[in-house]
Amino acid sequence: MTLTMAPRVRTLVLLLLAAACALLAGAGPASAHAAVTGSDPGQGAVVDKAPARISLTFSEQVAMSDDSLRVLDPEGKRVDTGKPSNVSGTTYAVPLHSGLPDGTYTVAYQVVSADSHPVAGAYTFSIGAPSKTSVSVSGQSADDGVVGWLYGFGRYVSYAGFIVMAGGAAFVLACWRRGSGVRPVQRFVVSGWVALTASTLALLLLRGSFTGTGKVADIFDLSLLGQVLQTKTGAALVSRLLLLAAAALFIAVLFGAYDKREDAQEKRDLTFGLSVGGVVVAAGLAASWAMSEHASVGLQAGIAMPVDVLHLLAVAAWLGGLGALLVALYRAPADTPVDRPAVRRFSRIAFGSVLTLIATGTYQSWRQLGSWSAFTDTRYGQLLLAKIGLVVVMVGVAWISRRWTGRLAEAAPVEAAAVREKERVGAGAESAGDVATADAGDKDAPAAGESDLDTASASDSDSDSAERPGAERAAQLARQQAARDAARQKRMRDADPNRFGLRRSVLAEAGIAVVLLAVTTVLTQTEPGRTEQEAKAASSSSASASSDTGASGALTLNMPFDTGGEDGKGIVTIDLDPARVGDNEMHVFVERPNGRAFDIPEVKVEFTLKAKDIGPLPVVPDHIATGHWSANGVQIPMAGDWQVDVTVRTSDIDEVTVSKNAQIG
């Protein structure tokens, strides 16, 4: 069902949708929310002997299939055996064939992060010495661009459909309080339901290809669809479809039985019931996003999911209600224009929604960024700054709309008095016309004594033929008069400068909202600033993770950690100098993911030489300064491949041990 708009409104909306599509074109499946924070062997590492397995450590839990981790020899043949398995925490490994020859090997991975986004990539390591390899390390399918773009566009349409449906229905129920008599707004709400339903079905079909091969041909693969239905994202999409069935019933009652209620008490009862039911359905739909995306993983997930639901409901109430108001201002019939109380009620709801968005958005920003530097150093932070800028501009335009609303309210008493005066003058003129008509009727009346028989005969013969054309003529005149009245009311409505100003400002708000929604959709597909900074820190230290020896022979080990508690993520650095047999000086540094030093309650280090069954040799360093511990006289009894275990405790109950192997001596 389509919505007819004025030409200038339609043109502006099409232009804004084109801009939204351009923004979405840059968001493909490569935008991941989990990141590789470590690997064994490391990227670019050269090991003396073939490892028994390879392992990857991610910034969060990921979902794996049988082919998620592949190891390829220089000729492109697979050398991994068995299925990938979770060995500890967020570390996953796959076993390798024994006795692998020297050369460069490629590790390719394709997994799904806990917040539903695919993660793909590849890196190389070498056994003995590097060699040529025929394997590409892109880690991405050549045909994933189309599927990724379609999936991103489907997400945009689903967000837009939810906002239009939920916000438009809330506007009708809480502000305008009219139902079936307002056809344009009804079409607006129904179009949101149709868009959300269609996009949800499309996302279900696209999901298997989007997280797998990325091929268009796999979109209609029923086996992939069956796998999707067993995932968290698939369950969320199916739940959304079930809730949309309840939403359809809600819309039918809102624009049907609700408007037909004439008894005031019955209408109040129905309004209360619809309000409760509508909030429950809308909250359930919003939860279908929260339970499968950013809010469901990471820091404080139990708090983040309700906050995300509240954030989505506030967005729908503001932007969806704004769209309904725009349609009502431009397309409402002349005999049922949007009234001033409705505009003022929506203004109050929008103000409350903005306050809610500020509170929930601040919490979400802190949770996803974690530091001020992430605003400018990460793509997520840059997009968030753009979103904040658009919200500020939109709030400014909304303030102008509130001023127009105030002027409408001030003009209302004056206009009402003018209307009453016109009605009084019109009634007087109508009375005078009736008297004149009566006098003329008396002059034209037949004189007493004329032939009543002739008159009666003429009346009898013409009554049947004159009665039908007269009734049709009266009906035609009535329709013409109604059309003239409607046109006059429309001219009066359009000539109102206050209403015209409100329409223009609301149109500007709606235009900004379209772009804002596009930026938000891209933001949900972008790696959060926290994980991006952690990945950068891990990748920068991966080259020296095995053993970074310089002229002094010092050893530096960098190990990311996550205790799982509040403020539990960071990087611990071990400096061992001169990293030789005998006495050594050890320094331990603890930093946040953004590079700032911070203190923790306890840090312990152990050295183990498994090849000789030596250790673990415990070392408890002394606290020197913020984020800095030191120990002198650390004894290394013999040279070898030592395992360095660091235990980090960030609270009374949050503790984790991270390990690295290093050649000492």
Image (tube, rainbow, N blue to C red):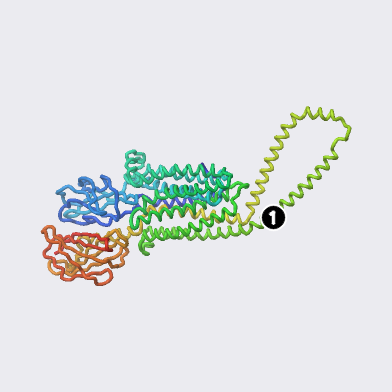
- Quick one: quadrant of the C terminus? bottom left
- Identity of the residue drawn at 49% across and 60% down: 393
- Name the spot of residue 359 as percent of width and height, x first: 43, 60
- Name the spot of residue 109 as percent of width and height, x first: 27, 49
The crowding category of the residue bearing disc 1, from other C-alpha atoms within 10 Å (few below 14, some 14 to 19, many at least 20), is: few
Q: What is the total number of numbered labels drawn onto the structure image?
A: 1
Residue 539 seen in the figure: no
- Name the spot of residue 2 as percent of width and height, x first: 52, 43
Drawn side of residue 500 relative to residue 67, left or right:
right
Residue 66 seen in the figure: yes
Give the residue furthest to the bottom. Answer: 624
User: Which quadrant of the figure has residue 447?
Assistant: top right
Give the residue furthest to the front. Answer: 265
The one nearer the camera, 502 or 540, is: 502
- Identity of the residue drawn at 29% across and 62% down: 570
User: Which quadrant of the figure has residue 567?
Assistant: bottom left
Drawn side of residue 437 relative to residue 224, left or right:
right
| Amino acid on which disc 1 is placed | Ala
Which element carries disc 1, helix, strand or loop?
helix
The one nearer the camera, 471 or 323, is: 471
- Name the spot of residue 566 as percent of width and height, x first: 32, 61
- Identity of the residue drawn at 78% across and 46% down: 433
User: Which quadrant of the figure has residue 564?
Assistant: bottom left
Residue 105, compared with residue 595, is above or below; it is above
Drawn side of residue 64 relative to residue 266, left or right:
left
Q: Residue at label 1?
A: 418
Give the residue furthest to the right. Answer: 449
The one nearer the camera, 619 or 489, is: 619
Residue 577, compared with residue 422, is above or below; it is below
